Image (tube, coloured by chain):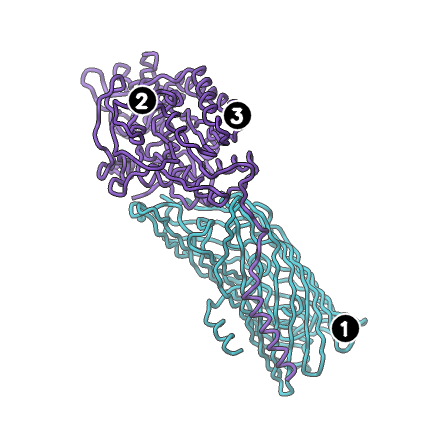
Amino acid sequence: MKKILLSFLLSVPVFGFAQSFQVNLQGQKQTAMGGAGTGLALDEAAIFFNPGAVSFLQQNGVQAGISPLYLKTAFRQTGSNLTEYNKDKIATPIMGYAVFGSPANRLRFGVGIYTPFGGAMHWKEDWTGKYTVTSLDLQAIYIQPTLSLKITDHIGIGGGLVYSLGKVDLRQALPINQSNGQPGTAQLKGDTKDFGWNAGIYVKTEVGITIGVTHRSQVTANVKDGDAIFAGPNSLQPTLPTKFTAALPLPATSSIGFGFYPSEKLTMALDVNWVHWNTYKVLAFDYNNNTTIQDTESPRNYHDAAALRLGFQHQTTAKLALRAGIGYAFTPVDDGYVTAEVPDADRLLLSAGIGYHGTKGFGMDLSFLYEDVMSRKQTNFESGLSGEYKTKAYIPGISLSYKF
Amino acid sequence: MKSNYIVKSILAIAVVSVASCKPELSEVTPSKGNADFSRYVALGNSLTSGFADGGLYLEGQKNSFPEIIAGQMKAVGGGSFTSPLFSEAQFNGSGYLRFAGFKADGTPNIERVTTQTAVRGQVNIPPVGNVILYTKYTGDINNYGVPGIKLDNADLAPYGNFNGYFERLLPGNAGTNNTSYIDFVMQKDFTFFSMWLGGNDILGYASSGGAGDVPTLKTTFSTKYASVLARLTSKGAKGVVATIPDITITPYFRTVTLASLLAAVRATPAGANVNTLYLRTGAGVARAATAEDLFTLTLSSDGVFGVNDPLKGPYGLSPANPIENKYALDKDEVAVVIDFTNSYNATIKAAANTSNLAIVDAGALLKEYGAGTKVNGVGVSAEFIRGNLFSLDGIHLTPLGYAIVANEFIKAINSKYSSSIPTVDASKYRGTLYP
């Protein structure tokens, strides 16, 4: 097992996948429960899922985890009999949380590191859509110091400042043929550093149901002076851009979640997420030299989209917990705007997992998430690329934790 | 131990799932429908032969639209397909135009490639004059595209003496040939044909500014189109025909414009105040040029514009030294070209319907793409060089343009014969080559 994990770690250390380029792999327990957890005070990952619930955690603890993500997309151009697949690429969104402060006190502290947005889509260099994208690597790692206050024994509030570290690397073939007949290439890469916030309320009702409401703000990832690496015909090379500016909104998410406890051993979680994708109107690139390459403004026109998540945890023994979940995420992408770098569609999520917690505070949680993205026939308004996409994702995950 | 077992099971399932469960798309089984593609032949002119960049050369021949279609027909029982290729040693064929770089003023420098051609000589054949001859081709032929041929020439017995590209395919030497184009094609049976003839019946008139040729009479066109189709279908072959492009939308007529000529004049110190250019119409009248008059690409490449004549004034700027008729398709001539094109196309559609053949509206297709669109992310338009659709001669297509045409033929065939020949990724074929 160690060997497998190691080989995953050696591959590209980024990215994920859940709804467009949003990633929902922030805690192994929650991932195993269909991604639900806003209305629970389950573990340290509450720093992400609901900062208000952190003050209700019974113990302090630290945890670190990883979810190696394997996604396979099939594409077939309209009218063609050939199916093309993206390259095998394992992305590895990471997560780590620590909660401090005396559990007896009303005020608790925490810090979280997680990967809420990302994407790793690599196509073959000569595939049908090469002039739209050959690869996209995108990741935003959020670092979130958090305060959580138990106002009464029934209500907790919490919030954290988000510092986002982003990276983007987009490549495509350049539709300008060199004298040998080969197309040129274009690569855009840059880093971003931006701020946002995450806040939540957690309510433990008299009737034994817990409720959480959270909002994670939008972070606008601004790439300033990113590197535009164009390789074109010699006669045009001096006129090609070398720098670019772009802004990508990482949208806000509002969530409401409920926790039910039908028996001492069984916990149920139900979440509804509302992702404010409507701010993603255009993807614009502003180049420093427009002699040959014009600035681009690609319409995206995403709309807000919901995700529904239902999860179960069965504390089978004092040490062993079994988990399962199901979810459904609606696509924010309208027909005509689907692109090959994020071939999005409605998706069904199925998950399962297991947790083992020893007596000395050490624990391990494993999850497995399967995402079935519905097939979608699309003709992109902008590129004219027309075909059918079908994606499946397989995401095992592991985290190690220590409670104190 | 139990949990250990569960952990191992989950991991094993994960590994197996990842390895085996590729996403699947619904099954596609290419089918020939109710056509038979076992021997496909292509009849046509330069557009069928793969002519591009002002010449017929090996790369163009290999990327001709019939070659592309035939490659795709293999998925539905298509047989072998042979184009009369130039040899590797003579791969430049007739010679062709090459984009060699930019001139000091930023305009493209276009040169003619004249090495390693297949030219074997030339002969004077009255009444057509000098005919350039090419190295003979012997062997199987499926692509019968002959640059320059008109529909009007298809049943002309001595035509093999007048056209070096046709002479090249025939066994006899120029001067001795007596086999018409349609007879030559009919010598060997075929099951399916494409025919894209008719463009040259108006092109010679248009490209010479109305000066060098006369359009084929509409009635002649109609009669000959029907009789050629009757021959082609006489043994039960099915097929596809295409309408002809409107030549006035091509870069050949849309690159050099009144506005661009005036801008060039005004950029010179002496020409700053020039507002009027003069041309000689087809009717022989010298008059001020208007935005409705079209100019040929050759007006620019021949380097005549603005050249001063001490007696008559600068070329094009003086009523005494107007732009010659051969460089200008005046608005009356434009109307003639459009009228004949529409008439020929109406004939083609009617004849195809009568013979129950598939039709490609290539005229409409090139208008649509010429207006500007994207093909799998590649911008195409009728713009010269940057448009990627038309080659450096401004009339014939790039490999990308021919691939777009090939897909349209495939779609028309599929729709008519209930077949499902797969289309190609047109963006795999190149547009303009930049130095």
Which shade of the palette goes to chain A? Answer: cyan
- Among the two numbered marks 3 and 2 on one chain, the one whose residue lies closer to the N terminus: 2
Whole-percent x and y of residue B383? Answer: 39, 34
- Tell me the quadrant of the picture where the C terminus of chain A can be found: bottom right
Q: Which mark is residue A261?
A: 1
- Given contact means CB atoms under 8 Å apart, are the residues at marks 3 and 2 in contact? no
Q: Chain of mark 1?
A: A
Is B271 in front, or is B307? B307
User: Of all residues shown, which one is farthest toward the left?
Assistant: B310
Residue under the point 57% across and 62% down: B21
Residue A99 can be seen, yes or no? no
- Give residue B356's quadrant in the image: top right
Residue B119 can be seen, yes or no? yes
Amino acid of disc 1 = Tyr
Is B6 in front, or is A194? B6
Residue density around tag 3, few if under 14, some if 14–19, many if 20 or more, within 10 Å: some
Q: For the residues marked 2 and 1, what is the alpha-carbon distance in whole angstroms?
A: 96 Å
Whole-percent x and y of residue A206? Answer: 80, 72
Residue density around tag 2, few if under 14, some if 14–19, many if 20 or more, within 10 Å: some
Is A112 in front, or is B144? B144
Q: Is residue B406 above or below residue B228?
A: below
Label the purple chain with its letter: B
Q: Which mark is residue B178?
A: 2
User: Of all residues shown, which one is farthest toward the right?
Assistant: A207
Q: Chain of mark 3?
A: B
Is B160 in front, or is B2? B160
Which element type, helix, strand or loop, lies under badge 3?
A: loop
Q: Chain of mark 2?
A: B
Q: Nearer the viewer, mark 3 or mark 2?
A: 2
Q: Which mark is residue B355?
A: 3
Amino acid of disc 2 = Asn
